[in-house]
Amino acid sequence: MKLVLYSGGDQQENYLLDLALFVQLIKKKNPLFTYIPASSHESEIYFHHFIDQYRPFGVNRFLSCPVDNPCDDVFLKEALKSDLIHLSGGNTFYFLKHLKKSKMLGRLKKYANEGGVLTGLSAGAIMLTPSINTAGLPHFDRDDNDENIRNLTSMGLVDFEFFPHYKNSIRYDVELRQYSRKLTYPLYALPDGSGIIINGESIQFVGKSFAFVHGKKTLIF
């Protein structure tokens, strides 16, 4: 399994994480990267940001395939042959709804299980975990579930949950501690600019990272 979970942040904040991605996971010359936005709304703007982020590393081939405005089968087959597929940030509930509706959730899981490099930022990173429950936390800073989604299960490619855009404060910690008591696996909370790299059986934390396990908080890195 080759996965990268980005918490958030801009190109400069994520430089070390991007560098680690290319050193560890991207070995092919002239790779093809596919961008899957959480929504087609303004996706072209963010697609160009995506290109600007990875072009300095020598990537010159890019595709974009919004899930709420599905690509045709020929284009989709090409996208699923990419050397890297990236899931963007956005509203996590809306993203999950359309990943399931378009049947992309299962296809992306298969892509990752067959050795493809799958990355996600914020909402996109949450998609790699067992559920998107963390999108509803904390109550004062959460995604709106306007889609009224009740089944929050996602890809389940990792045995932990992920909380992006973490702020090291009591207000956040109270709800994350409480939620972690319900889990049988860790909850990792990372601020913008930090991330997690999965390479086979190896897990690497880049930047400041915290774990919430059975109500206890620990600084990992």
Image (cartoon, rainbow, N blue to C red):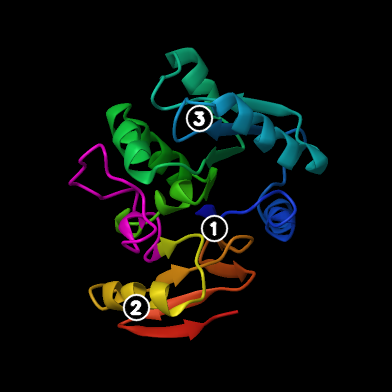
Residue shown at 42% from the left, 38% from the top: 108
Q: Are marks 1 and 3 in contact (CB under 8 Å)?
A: no
Q: Which disc is residue 171 wearing?
A: none
Q: Which residue is mark 3?
A: 80
Q: Nearer the viewer, residue 100 or 199?
A: 100
- Can you say whether 220 is above or below 128 in the image? below
Quarter of the image where one finds residue 131: bottom left
Disc 2 vs disc 3: which is toward the camera? 2
State the CA–CA distance, disc 1 to disc 3. Answer: 24 Å
Precedes in sequence: disc 1 or disc 2? 1
- In the rendered image, residue 142 lying in the magenta stretch gets the answer yes
State the CA–CA distance, disc 2 to disc 3. Answer: 40 Å
Q: Secondary structure at mark 2?
A: helix
Q: Which amino acid type corresponds to the residue marked 3 in the rendered image?
A: Leu
Q: Which disc is residue 174 wearing?
A: 2
Q: Secondary structure at mark 1?
A: loop
- Can you say whether 57 is above or below 157 in the image? above
Quarter of the image where one finds residue 204: bottom right
Q: Which residues are magenta?
A: 135-161
* Residue 185 visible in the displayed image: no
Disc 1 vs disc 2: which is toward the camera? 2
- In the rendered image, residue 73 lying in the magenta stretch gets the answer no
